[in-house]
Amino acid sequence: MPQPFDTTSPPFNRLTPKEVKRLVSSLDVSYFRRGYSVIEQDAETTHLYIVLKGRVEELNSETKEVFAQYIKDDIFDAHAVLNGTAKHKYKALEDTLCYVLPKSVFLSAYKNNRSFAEYFTASFSQRKKLLEHAQKQKNLAEFILTQIDETNIQPILTLPHETSIHEATLILKKQQQDCALVSLEGKPNDIGIITRTNLLHAIVERALPTAHPIGEVATSPVISVTLGDYLFNAMILMTRDRVKRVRVTHDDHTVGMLDMTQVLSLFSTHSHVLSLQINRASSIEELAQAANNQQQLVETLSNNGIHTQFVMELISAVNEKIIEKAFQLTIPAHRHGQCCLFVMGSEGRGEQILKTDQDNGLIVQDGVDWPSVHEDMQTFSNVLARLGYPACPGHVMVNNPKWVNTESEWKKRVRYLSKISDESSLMDLAILADSHAVAGNTTLISAITSTLVDTLKGNMLTLNTFIRPSLAFSVPLTLFGGLKADKQGLDVKKGGIFPLIHGVRTLALEYGLPQTNTFERLTALVQSNAIDEDTANNLTEALKLFVKTRLRQQLDDDAARNLLDVSALPRTDRDLLRHSLSEVKAFKERLAAHYQVRD
C-alpha cells in the first residue's frame, strides 16, 4: 500500500488490536479515473471505501442533486454496506485512490464491537427519526412537491362574449359554480373571467340591464398556470397578483380552474392570510402588524424543510406587497401614475428572505412638476424604517436625491456611468442592473433596464472592469480544498454569494438578458449558450445552499449574519459547502479567462 493505514482516527480507534490486524490485512487500494462511477445508485455494495487521495461526489442519478463530497480520510458508503444497496451514486470528480475494505470484514467488526457500531448508527438513527417525523407531518414538504393535475383542479365553464348577464347567472346557478371564463369578442386567444360578484356589481352599482353582454363586464387578463406546475407557484401568483383564482392550461387550452380555497386546504403557513392583511391595511400601524408576521412565515417555511428557492419567491412576493402598500399609503394618489418606485439588490433580484437594508430609487415621468418629491421620499423612507427596513449604509435610497431622477436623467446617468468605468460608477451600475419596479407606473422602469441592456450588451471593454469585483475576493478554501475560516467565522457572502451573483449578472449584461433574478439569469444564459447546463445547475445548487445555510444561522442568531460558524455545521453540510465553494472558484477562473482579467 502507498502508506500505512491510520487506525488511530475515528472510528477505527475503537477497534481491538485483533480487529485492527484483520482490517489492515484485508485492505486493498483501488484507483478510479475521473468521472468513473465508484458505486451506482441502487447497486448492491460489496466494499466500504476510505478516500486516500482525490475527490468523490455523492449524488442522485435522476435529479443530479449533490448530497456530499468526500476527500482524504472520508468514509463512504457505510449506509449501503449495512442496508445492502446504495441509495445514491458515487462518482470520482478527479483521479482518486481509495482504501477498499471487504463488506464481510466491516460487518464482522460492526456486529462484534458495539463502540465501533455506534459511530455509524448514531447518525443513521437521527436520519430515521427525521424521516419518520417528515412522514407524519405530510405538510409543507409534501405540498411543495405537489403538482397541479386533474385531481386538484375544478372544471370551469367558458361562455361566449355575447351571453347576457341574465343567462350567465342562470347557467352558473344550474352548474353550481361561482365563476366562468369568457371568450372576449374578436380576440379568440384573449380570455376574461366573471364571478357572481361581478354580475351583482354590474347590475347594482353600474345599473346595467340583465340583457347586457358579459364580455363587457368580464375582468381580463386572467392569471394562468400550466398543468404540471407546482401548487406552490400558484400560491405565489395568487399572493403577488392578489387574485383568488387562476386558470389552468395545457398546450394553451383551458383544462380547469384552481382557487385559493383549494390551495389553503393544502397549505398551512397562512401566507395568503398575511397577503390579505397587507392589502387591507388602511394605515401604517396596520401594515406594520402584517409586516411583523413576515419573520414568522420565514421560520415556518424553513423549519418545515421547504425548498430554498420557493421560500425566496414567496417571501419576495410578500415583501414586494408590503413596500407597494407603504408607497400607496404614503405618496399622494395623484402621483402614483407619474412615477415608478423600484428596488435593487437582493430585493430587486427577488432573492431576499429576511428583511435587509433599504435599496430603492424613483423614476419620475418626464415633464412632471413635483416640488415636494424629496420631502415625500424622506417620509417614505421613514415609513419603511418603521416597518423594519433599516436605512442603507451606502444611502442607496429614495431619500437621497442621487437616486431620484426623471426618465431622461436616468437614461443619461446610465450611459455616463458605463463610460467612466471607475470603481464607484461600476458599483452604481451593478446596483442598477438588479432594478425591479414595485409601485407606481411600473412601465417607467424601462428607462433604466432598456438603457442598461443597450449600453452594456457586448461591451467587453466596460465589462472587463465591471467583472473585477467578482474576482477581487478569494474563495474561502485552503490549498487542499478544505474550508478556510477565521475565528469570527466563514464569510459566505463575500467568498461565495457575491462572486457568484455578480459573475452571473455580468454575463447576463453581456448577452443583453432582461432577467434580474440569478436563477432566471442562469437559465437564460444556458439558452443563450453562454454557459453549459452542468455549470448552471451547479451554480444554482451552490447559491441555494449558501442562502439556506446562512438563513439557518441567522434565525438562530441574528448577529451571525454573513459569517458562518463552520464548526456548528453537520459534516454533510460542511462537505456540501466545500463542494459549492469549489464550484464558485472554478466559475471565477472561467470568468477571468473570458474577460481577460489576469491581475
Image (cartoon, rainbow, N blue to C red):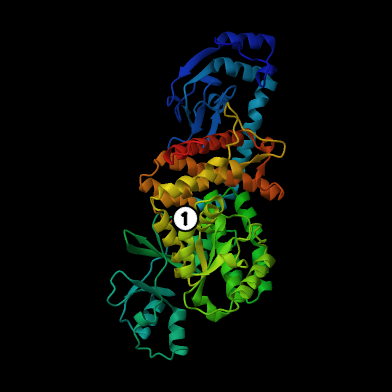
Q: Position of residue 223 (x, y in %)?
A: 42, 67
Residue 16 against residue 11 in the figure, above or below? above
Q: If the image is split into quadrants, where does the N terminus sit?
A: top right
At x 49%, y 54%, the residue is 420
Residue 8 against residue 376 in the figure, above or below? above
At x 69%, y 38%, the residue is 568
Which residue matches tag 1?
418
Q: Position of residue 53 (x, y in %)?
A: 54, 20
Q: Is residue 272 visible?
A: no
What amino acid type is highlighted by mark number 1?
Ser
* 220 or 416: nearer the viewer: 416
Left or right of 550: which side holds 590? left
At x 38%, y 66%, the residue is 155
Q: Is residue 398 visible?
A: yes
Q: Position of residue 524 (x, y in %)?
A: 40, 50
Residue 359 against residue 47 in the figure, above or below? below
Q: Counting other residues with Cα less than 10 Å from the Cα at mark 1, is it few (<14), some (14-19), or many (20 or more)? A: many
**Secondary structure category for the residue under label 1:** helix
Left or right of 275: which side holds 16? right
Q: Position of residue 121 (x, y in %)?
A: 64, 28
